[in-house]
Amino acid sequence: MRNPMLKLYRLTLTLLAALLVSACSSEPSAPTPKGSTSVAPAATGQYIGLPVEGKPFPRLVLTTLDGKRVDSTALFKGKTVILNIWATWCPPCREEMPDLIALSKALPEERFVVAGLSVDNDIRQLAAYTGQAGIPFPLFQDPNGRGISEPLLGVTKYPETFVISKDGVLLTKVIGAYPWGDPKVIELLRQIDATGQLPAE
């Protein structure tokens, strides 16, 4: 079965025209760790099937910007989750952020969680950007992506966004910036929340 979100992507190409940027694969000027593999950028809004799609999303211990630990199972329990992996130094991530902010404001908090996991190393830069952008949803830090993003989630390009059902099952992953604030996308997420699965095309 074809991914219904891919069909929605085609319906919103005009919105994506303003976001035609590639995903970021690493922090600018950062040395490549020994043994790591370079990855080519992904097209904006490209949908990638996951080996773990349809299986429980892994439990994560997340760190807030002020150093507190949060268990993802408690934060996500009973809610449809949109988890965005991003960085302040990533242009597509910054382009996408206003849509994520709009999405978080459009969805009821009692049913949805929009959360961001930043791979920034500089907590001061991250905090400054967060305040300037007015990000209202929960943010967590994973420096260099070494603790969670890369080893546990397989994230190698940014932004990457996971859509997780209210039962804790990974439904799909998006690589690249996407217009999450578009009404069609919001309606699709409401359908996902109601059924716990991706709607048939």
Image (spheres, helix red, strand yellow):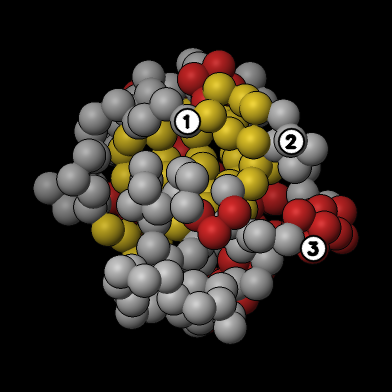
Q: Residues within 10 Å of mark 2 (few under 14, many from 20)?
A: few
Q: Which amino acid, by three-letter code, is at mark 2?
A: Gly
Q: Tag on residue 25? A: none
Instruction: Give the residue drawn at x 44%, y 76%.
Output: 32
Dot 2 falls on a residue whose secondary structure is loop
Could one spot residue 44 in this view of the protein?
A: no
Q: Position of residue 59 (x, y in %)?
A: 42, 26
Q: Nearer the viewer, residue 167 or 126?
A: 126
Would you place residue 3 above or below residue 187 in this image?
A: below
Q: Position of residue 21 (x, y in %)?
A: 51, 81
Could one spot residue 147 in this view of the protein?
A: yes
Q: Position of residue 96 (x, y in %)?
A: 60, 64
Instruction: Give the residue drawn at x 64%, y 60%.
Output: 120
Q: Tag on residue 67? A: 2
List the residue tagged with mark 3.
Answer: 125
Q: Which amino acid, by three-letter code, is at mark 1?
A: Leu
Q: Nearer the viewer, residue 159 or 29?
A: 29
Q: Which amino acid, by three-letter code, is at mark 3?
A: Gln
Q: Residues within 10 Å of mark 1 (few under 14, many from 20)?
A: some
Dot 1 falls on a residue whose secondary structure is loop
Instruction: Give the residue drawn at x 65%, y 27%.
Output: 69
Would you place residue 175 above or below residue 136 in this image?
A: below
